[in-house]
Each structure stands twice: as C-alpha cells, then as structure tokens.
Image: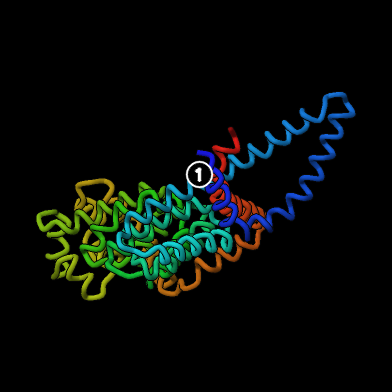
Amino acid sequence: MPGNKANLEITATDKASAKLKKVGRNAEGLGGKLGAVNKKFSSMGMGSKLGAAAAGAAVAGLGMQMSSMARDFDRNFTQVMTLLPGTSKKVFGDMEADLKGLSQELGVNLVDATTGLYNAISAGVPQKNVFEFMRVASKAAIAGGNDLTSTVTTLAQVMNVYGVGVEEAEDISDKLFTTVKLGMTTLPQLSSSLANVLPVAQSLGVSFGEVSSMLAVLTASTGQTAESITRLRGLFTAASKDTSILAQAIKRELGASFADLIASGRTTSEIMQDLRDRMPLEDFRNLFRRTEAQSAALLITGENAVKVAGAYDEMTESIGATEDAFKTVDESMAQSWDKSIENLKTMGVEIGTVILPLMGSFLQ
C-alpha cells in the first residue's frame, strides 16, 4: 500500500539521519562529479537521460553491495542471538556495537568476527567476557596469518580440554606463537591438527606447555606439523595403556606408571630419556609397536632432550609473544591497508542496514 511504503521510507530515513547526514556531505561531492559526467554525455549527443541512468545504476549497484553486506552481518548476528535466549535487546545492541568496534580497531572482517563470536559462545566462552576472548583471538589470527574462525576454535579447544577460563586464553596463544617461533610450523597448521593430541595428553596430566615444547622440537626436526602431532599422540596412547610393552617397561624400570611419573613432576622427555638410558638402543626401539610412537620417543630424547627442556623453559616465559607478533604485523603497510578496507566495509554494513528496507522500492 502507498501509505505503508511512505511510512517505511520515513521511518528508515529517521533512523538513518545521523549516519546519512555524514554520508550526505560526501554524496554532495559525488553528485557534482555525476553532474559533470552527465554534461559530458550531453556534449557527446547522448542525452542527459543516459547519464542519469548510468549514475542511477552506479548508485543502485553500491546500494545493493552495502545491503548485501548488511544482510550477511544480520544473518550471522541473528545466529548469535539464538545462543542467548532471554537476552535483552539492549545487551544485543551493545554486543553488536562491540563487534563493530573490534572490527574497526583491529581490522578484522565484521562478518568473520560475528561467526567467530558464534563459535566462541557455542564453545562455552561466557558472554560476560567473550569480547576479551575475541580480542585475544583476533590479535592471534592477525599475527599468525590465520583465519579468525580457526583461531577461535583452537583457543577454545585448548581451554575446554584443560578446563581453564578466558583468563588463560592469552597464555595459550603465547605458547602457540612460541611453538611457531621455535619449530618449523605455522599457526594455521597447528590449528588444523592440534585437537588430535590434546585429549590424551590432558588425560595423562601432560600440560599444554609441555605438549607445545615437544611439538616445537618435533616440527623443527621434521618440518611436518600434522605428522608430528600424530607421532606424539601415538606415544601418549602407548604410554597410557597398561597392557602395552611401553607402559609395562616404564613401570618395571622406573617404578611407577607414566601418569604417576608426570604427576610427580617429571616431563615426557625426561621419562623417555631415563628409560632409554637403562637399556640398549635396540631394546628401547622395540618397546614401540607403532612407528609413530617410536619416532616421537627417539626425537624427544638423545641430543634433542636438551632442546625439549629449553623449549619447555621458553614456554613458561612466553608472556607477551602474541602481543609482540601482533604489533609487528599491525605496523605493516599491508595491515594498514586491510584495516582501512575493513573499516569501509563496516561503514558499508551500517549504511546497508539503513537502506536495506528501501532497496526493493528503489530498484522498482
């Protein structure tokens, strides 16, 4: 109905007034340029209508693009809302503003940040400090050249497996960056496979810092991330089974189970080295039925035992590793460009949110 259409336009314009006034000042300059183009068309005998049509098409295309971005953001943010039933509109409004602020400050894609927020809340990160977590994850993703969704998932996995809160997120991120620095791996490579070893490591009492130190040495020795994680998981699995040759040898030679030795303060590398020192090398090799476990044990003992110990020490002193890496990337020309682009996209989402209801009428 005509009246409803008019009301829609008036309401949307009222809601948009503050933003569109600012955009309008820029549009005046654009209008002058479009007028010049129109005159050019006229001088060529093509008529002012053709120039107006071209300008209208350009404006329509821009409007469609901004509306599309607004639609994608709204769709993702609505999914976030489904995870928080009973939450007030004011809280959701504050969360939306925090997301846009995070995007503009750090230069993360707004739609990706919304997906990351959904995954974080879905993984159990409390709403009250989810943006503290998102800030850490965003900096880690930017510094490590990783996508935000994968980074959120990795940090949340470590937190959930080891039963720690958001206050440990930055420490986990720092250990990941220290692993990258000391090993031959990347944050995306770690993100894709790390979950395969964490549950069995945690069940034996092996800390995330110790897992990280061994992965640093394993990847530095082999250049293979997924394979190194598989080797380490094989070693932990063999050590955890009471009936395995390895587990029986540990109890016989060292007087306690692998888990009990870990609980007493020993590290995996120290346990394997002690066991290796008590028998001929060939006998030590024969303790492992699977080559993955054998390879891991050999690579964290012998000459590499000192490297693992050194890496473990660095893990305990890794505070600030993420922030240092982020600052280096954030000062680069490429990141400045990316940040500017994401700021424009965020502005486009805000404008698109206003004009989305009008696009159908405008296009008709």
Q: Is residue 302 visible in the rendered structure shown here?
A: no
Of 335 and 353, nearer the camera is 353
Name the secondary structure under disc 1. Answer: helix
> Of all residues shown, which one is farthest toward the left?
243
Mark 1 — residue? 4
Q: How many marks?
A: 1
Say above or below: 13 vs 163.
above
Which of the 4 image quarters holds residue 316?
Answer: bottom left
> Of all residues shown, which one is farthest toward the top?
45
Say above or below: 106 vs 73.
below
Residue drawn at (68%, 54%) of the image: 23
Of 4 and 304, nearer the camera is 4
Which of the 4 image quarters holds residue 303?
Answer: bottom left
Residue drawn at (18%, 67%) of the image: 259
281 with respect to 13 (left or right):
left
Q: Is residue 313 visible in the rendered structure shown here?
A: yes
Q: Position of residue 197 (x, y in %)?
A: 29, 55
Q: Position of residue 246 (x, y in %)?
A: 17, 56
Q: Amino acid at mark 1?
A: Asn
